[in-house]
Image (spheres, rainbow, N blue to C red):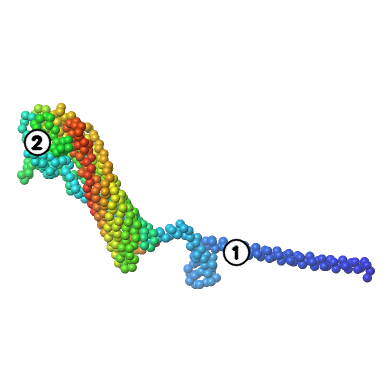
Amino acid sequence: MDAQALLVRCCKLGLKQSHLVVTKRDRHAMLFVKRVTCSLLTLASVFLATDLHAQNWGPEPNSQVVQQGDPYAYGGPTAYAELIPDGRLSTLSLDTPLGTAIKTHASGSWMRLEYWNAKIGHRGGRSLGEPIADLNGNVIDNISEPFDLPLFPSQDLPIIFTGRAVAPTTDGTDWDDIGGIKGSFGIPLDQRSWIEGSVWALEEQGESLRVPSIPPTSLAPTFGVFPVEFIVIPFTIDGQPGSFQNLPNSPASIAPIIVYDTDFFSEYSVNVWSAEINHVYDLRIPHDGWTLQSIIGYRHEEYSERLTFGGTFGNISGYATDGTVNTGPLTNPQTNRIDSKVHNYRNALQFGFRSEVKQRGLTLGVEPKVALGLGLIRSRVNTSNAREPGDLSSILNDPLLLIDDPDSTTDFDRELDFAPSAELNLYAKYDVNEWLKFRIGYNLTWMGRVGAADTSIKYNTISAADPTMTPDTLDFGVKQNVNNRIINAFTIGGEIVLP
């Protein structure tokens, strides 16, 4: 073989070897590409599967398909469980601190709404006015019983009796059939304790004082008893009890009494509401249907009264007729108005317990509570021409009367006082179903040492400018006093328990 032929064969062998090398590298490259592609596809499928788990694939599988047990049906139990595991749903819904707290405390919470039909009893009432002595010097303590009213027409005529008089009284005043509403709630803290709160209020109620009608239809006696012709309010003079003995037959006399012979009006109203928040704890495990719970909390009460009264003296009775200065009915009848208002703000710590017995869906319970705290009593007395009706000195134009009643005066006072309260609840509940309960009950509330409008009025006038007088001896105003009030109520309502 010559050199040319050998060169050609060597070139062919080199090309063949080069082709083999290139082909092998290409195969390795393709295999690498395929491996990378498969890895990317596998990774993508993993992420895709994760997204599929978090998606909502619609409602649960058809119940008919599940019952037939078709393993190839779309949405079958196996496929549904694989797509959405049980733990994934709870994790997505309430697996947060806020959601856990809501789920824990909302379950078992309850709300209750009740209607109240209440009565507020008025105890410790008083006659409007102060005791006064008769012509013999005997003190008339019970001025709410009819007594003889003397007449002093002038200094030249003897003292005579002009008719029967009586003072209004608030004793026995009751506010009946008062509507009210109470809302309550309870939130469990754990298996044995929870927070409870309630608010209740009664509508404002007003009553008129019981007094005889004036003027009477007839002055003739009935069964030997003469009718009441005057409504009167006696008062003190310079802080001392008034007396008909102290009135000589002189135009300088000051009559220690307010007289109405034409008309008399009165309005005595009351308003009350209360709120409380308590911590309730199970003292025993209610395994046999009997529960005993302690109650500790805070109580706020607001109780207010307002008494407004007054009337007209027109001398149609002839009480102020003297034959010279005044001979008949007044051209300008005398009128007056006295308004007393008291508001009590009471805050107290509250203690009590609750005991219930439950059998077959019927629960009977008793809940006594006692509250001890402080109360702020705000009082106001406003008067207009307080002692003018029937005042002989003003009719006779008495020149010796140095101080007369202004047209309108207002006196204020505020005082802190001990404020005890007590409450008793008796009730029965029936479980209509798992979440609804029907409830009826009786509530008795006692409020001690509350300021009252009728006992917080000072009936007094001053006859001379005496610098030694203390503020307590000044004109009509506030004379702070306290009483007790009792509220009775029948309740009916419903209770809803959250699942």
Q: Which residue is mark 2?
A: 245
**Residue 46: numbered disc:** 1
Q: Is residue 199 left or right of residue 244?
A: right
The numbered disc on residue 3 is none
- Mark toward the viewer: 2 or 1: 2
**Residue 53 in picture, x, y percent from top left:** 54, 63
Please tell me how crowded label 2 is: few (under 14), some (14-19), or many (20+) other residues with Cα within 10 Å: few
Neighbourhood count class around disc 1 (C-alpha, 10 Å): few under 14, some 14–19, many 20 upward:
few
Which kind of residue does numbered mark 1 sit on?
A: Val
Mark 2, secondary structure of its residue: helix
Residue type, numbered disc 2: Gln
In which quadrant will I find the N terminus?
bottom right
Callout 1: SS: helix
**At x 6% / y 35%, what residue is drawn?**
160
Q: Is residue 478 above or below residue 91?
A: above
Measuring from the top left, give residue 295's x and y in whole percent: 32, 58
- Name the residue rendered at 19%, 32% in the picture: 466
Percent coordinates x, y for residue 421 in the rendering: 26, 52
- Reply above or below: 199 against 47: above
Q: Position of residue 248 (x, y in %)?
A: 9, 32
- Regarding residue 137, the answer to whether it shows in the image is yes
